[in-house]
Image (cartoon, grey):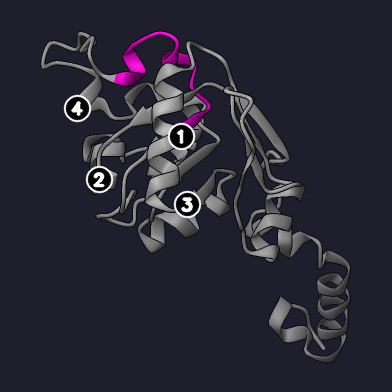
Amino acid sequence: MEPFRKVEGIAAPLPMINVDTDMIIPKQFLKTIKRTGLGVNLFDEMRYDLDGREIPDFVLNREPFREAQVLIAGENFGCGSSREHAPWALLDFGIRCVIAPSFADIFFNNCFKNGVLPVVLPKETVDMLMREADEAGGRPFTIDLEKQEILRPTGNAPVPFEVDPFRRQCLLEGLDDIGLTMQKSTAIDGFEDGQKMREPWLYGTAA
């Protein structure tokens, strides 16, 4: 997993509440078990018409938001089914951070496990950032996880945010569940070596 320390990029405003995971990545794209290739279908039913043509009014089809690395949305983002493809699609599009007043729990947890930072802020603050994103004209926001603050293109005071210390450290180091397990590889190898000697039949070896 790619470490997340500081991301500087365009923020796209999505002033919608209850954006569910089927809106983020519709069910017909869930056949793959690969984490790549889903970005083109992110928000598919809002980005494209029935003939596959872009809908010009949708934010990610407009300049400069086509290159967004930050998404600012309304309450209860990521509700609905638990599909892990939702953060996969966001990440494959290029979005590394989602800012919202609240998130669905499973989606929130899946983001951390896939290198996407979900930032929870008061609705008033999110609304302010959404307005600034709309007016930024391509000027970037900076999401600094080390300092836990958002630098705004207006030059106004940074916006602080809080992240669970363990999850923060995992993102900073690029550690998903497998990476965390591999940190214990020496202890795991030692246990297996001892078990092979004590209980060789578990490994198909004669005593």
> CB of mark 1 within 8 Å of CB of mark 3?
yes
Q: Which kind of residue does numbered mark 3 sit on?
A: Leu
Position of 82 with respect to 71 (left or right) is left
Q: Nearer the viewer, residue 184 or 201?
A: 184
Dot placed on the residue nearer the N-terminal end, 4 or 2: 2
Q: Which amino acid type corresponds to the residue marked 2 in the rendered image?
A: Ile
Kindly identify which residue carries mark 3. 121
Point out the frontmost of discs 3 and 2: 3
Rendered image: mark on residue 129: 1
Q: CA distance from mark 1 to mark 3?
A: 10 Å
Query: Percent x, y for residue 47?
Result: 25, 20
Mark with earlier residue (4, 1): 4
What is the C-alpha distance between the residues marked 4 and 1?
26 Å
Q: What's the distance in space between the residues labelled 4 and 2, CA to CA?
A: 16 Å
Residue situated in front as seen by the camera: 150 or 12: 150
Specify start and end residues of the magenta stretch as a single range: 59-71
Read off the residue under disc 4.
Answer: 45
Name the secondary structure under disc 4: helix
- Please, what secondary structure does the residue beneath circle 3 have? loop
User: Residue flagged by tag 4: what amino acid is it?
Assistant: Glu
Disc nearest the viewer among 1 and 2: 1
What residue is pinned by disc 2?
A: 17
